[in-house]
Image: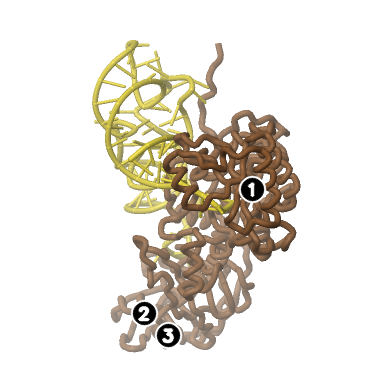
Chain colours: A brown, B yellow
RNA sequence: GCUCCUGUGGUGUAGUCCGGCUAAGCAUACUGCCCUCUCAAGGCAGUGAUCCCGGGUUCAAAUCCCGGCGGGAGCACCA
């Protein structure tokens, strides 16, 4: 008798039909925009599965629509993957296989599995709705071949398309003689004017996946209905069929990923660019201080499911916090500074550790008894209160007003009194802190999605590299974005 | 409208294929305690799910069957 191994699974579920050392996956982005969290999920899943079975990952640019694609995006996607740490074994472009695709298209036409349709868009769409064939569908092979050839020169864009001979009465509307190839005269970012008949997604993916040796192909759920077409095409072409699986797309509440939404925001200046820290683009997340390891852990924690969910950004933050905490320098920051004078100060310098547990060096701060403390803390103080200036000494408040005075009562740590961070008044560094909030609330642009707060911090800030993660004590984690700007990562 | 997919605590998931070992594990969020010169991290504990609903099969159902209901997606010469 076989005992069922029923136990907690770690990582992604096993792949159906996967053999060790014989798995090939692919990540097929269209180079039509900057990579975002959705690309991260897809590429990480693709890579993890390849890794899990000792297989390979192919990065394939699905560049079959010259109207939308641009050279800079090919590069941006590779930069994004590099940053994420997704390693691929091969890079290729679908557009490099145009001759193969033409050959396959011709094969479909010759076998009567595809035909050239010259009906106008409205008629086609009407026929689809009404499940009716058009007269082009009945055309003989000669007609189709003549028209096919004319697509390369005589026809204008929109005048003729190649359609799959599917099933006009299928419940699955995708199967009602879908478009396979169309004419686009826009120059291609790589091939310029070399081609003008371009395959659409369904044809390109099916052929490419098959010839690339892909064993397991993954895509997001909204393509689900196209899987029937995918297999039908490969069937008619007598080509090897990869296993196609779908997963739910990843998006955060209030942080849309679609170019349709994001592009206008950039153009109208509502966000600073595609690297705005409020955006779920990889560049945005990076600037915000989210690290790649956190994204990977987060993506894997979501599992491989088809349920429609909006995972909370907080979960990503939690993974991130655990990763950056051990490497974040601790610094003091003061918002809304109030002057505090310690009348009997006797120190000229203090040395403070940059991290409570790990050895990240120490910094020296000059002291002269004149400080700034946060107004938030200052306004709670009363004469006679005892507080501790963190890492320094304890003081008793002797005067309250627009400025505060106090005197030292001791230097030993007292657990029960309030502890407040401070900045020495002799050399403060002015910075602004960018704090992101969700971009959209109930589909409305959140005009307050970016808060810019003025603050002062320590001289040591200037010594840190751009990109450094800092934990401003009692405030939160921030990433140094420039000499005078930090971006709030999370609490 | 039609078709497909989906439905486990506030949230994200594991378990569902092959019914019992789990009246449901983990993470996140929240609460409390410990630790700590931070409101962080770490340690411990706790709150929180009749596994969408209703039937059925069975000694036994989150898991199988039937019927509802909720949510999402597709219906492009975009991917």
The answer to whether residue A212 is seen in the rendering is: no
Q: How far apart are labels 3 and 1 at the CA level?
A: 62 Å
Residue A163, quarter of picture: top right
Task: Locate residue A310, reporting x and y percent.
Answer: 42, 50
Whether labels 3 and 2 belong to a single chain: the reply is yes
Q: Is A182 on the left-hand or right-hand side of A255?
A: right
Residue drawn at x 74%, y 59% is A194
Position of B69 with respect to A215 (left or right) is left
Chain letter of the residue beneath label 1 in the structure image: A
Task: Provide the residue designation for mark 2.
Answer: A375
Asked if residue A464 lies left or right of residue B17, the reply is right
| A165 in relation to A297, above or below | above
Which is nearer the eye, A158 or B33?
A: A158
Residue at image mark 3: A342
Question: For mark 1, what is the residue?
Answer: A27
Question: Which one is nearer the viewer's eye here, A414 or A471?
Answer: A471
Residues tagged 3 and 2 counted as in contact (Cβ below 8 A): no
């Amino acid at each position: 008798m076989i005992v069922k191994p029923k136990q907690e699974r770690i990582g992604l579920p096993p792949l159906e039909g996967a053999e060790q050392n014989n798995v090939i996956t692919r990540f097929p982005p269209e180079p039509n925009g900057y990579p975002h969290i959705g690309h991260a999920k897809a590429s990480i899943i693709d890579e993890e599965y390849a890794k899990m079975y000792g297989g390979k990952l192919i990065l394939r640019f699905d560049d079959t629509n010259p109207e939308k694609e641009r050279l800079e995006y090919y590069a941006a996607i590779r930069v994004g993957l590099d940053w994420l740490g997704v390693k691929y074994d091969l890079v290729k472009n679908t557009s490099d296989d145009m001759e193969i695709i033409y050959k396959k298209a011709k094969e479909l036409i010759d076998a009567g599995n595809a035909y050239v349709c010259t009906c106008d868009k409205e008629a086609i769409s009407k026929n689809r709705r009404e499940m009716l064939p058009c007269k082009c569908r009945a055309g003989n092979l000669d007609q189709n071949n003549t028209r096919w050839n004319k697509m390369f020169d005589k026809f204008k864009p929109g005048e003729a398309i190649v359609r799959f001979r599917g099933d006009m009465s299928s419940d699955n509307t995708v199967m009602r003689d879908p478009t396979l190839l169309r004419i686009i005269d826009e120059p291609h970012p790589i091939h310029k004017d070399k081609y003008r008949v371009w395959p659409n997604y369904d044809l390109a993916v099916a052929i490419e996946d098959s010839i690339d040796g892909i064993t397991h192909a993954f895509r997001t759920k909204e393509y689900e209905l196209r899987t029937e077409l995918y297999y039908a095409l490969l069937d008619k072409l007598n080509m090897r069929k990869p296993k196609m699986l779908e997963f739910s797309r990843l998006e955060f509440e209030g942080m849309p990923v679609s170019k349709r939404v994001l592009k206008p925001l950039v153009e109208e200046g509502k966000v600073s660019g595609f690297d705005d820290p409020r955006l779920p683009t990889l560049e945005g997340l990076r600037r915000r201080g989210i690290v790649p390891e956190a994204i990977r852990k987060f993506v894997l924690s979501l599992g491989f499911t088809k349920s429609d969910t909006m995972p909370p950004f907080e979960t990503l933050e939690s993974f991130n916090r655990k990763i950056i905490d051990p490497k974040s320098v601790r610094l003091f920051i003061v918002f809304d500074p109030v002057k505090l004078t310690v009348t009997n100060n006797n120190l000229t310098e203090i040395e403070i550790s940059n991290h409570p547990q790990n050895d990240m060096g120490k910094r020296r701060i000059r002291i002269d008894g004149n400080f700034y403390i946060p107004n938030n803390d200052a306004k709670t103080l009363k004469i006679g209160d005892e507080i501790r200036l963190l890492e320094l000494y304890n003081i008793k408040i002797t005067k309250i007003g627009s400025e505060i005075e106090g005197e030292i009562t001791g230097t030993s740590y007292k657990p029960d009194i309030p502890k407040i961070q401070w900045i020495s008044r002799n050399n403060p560094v002015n910075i602004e802190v960018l704090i992101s909030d969700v971009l959209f609330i109930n589909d409305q642009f959140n005009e307050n999605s970016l808060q810019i707060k003025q603050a002062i911090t320590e001289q040591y800030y200037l010594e840190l590299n751009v990109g450094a993660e800092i934990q401003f004590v009692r405030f939160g984690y921030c990433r140094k974005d420039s000499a005078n700007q930090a971006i709030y990562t999370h609490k």
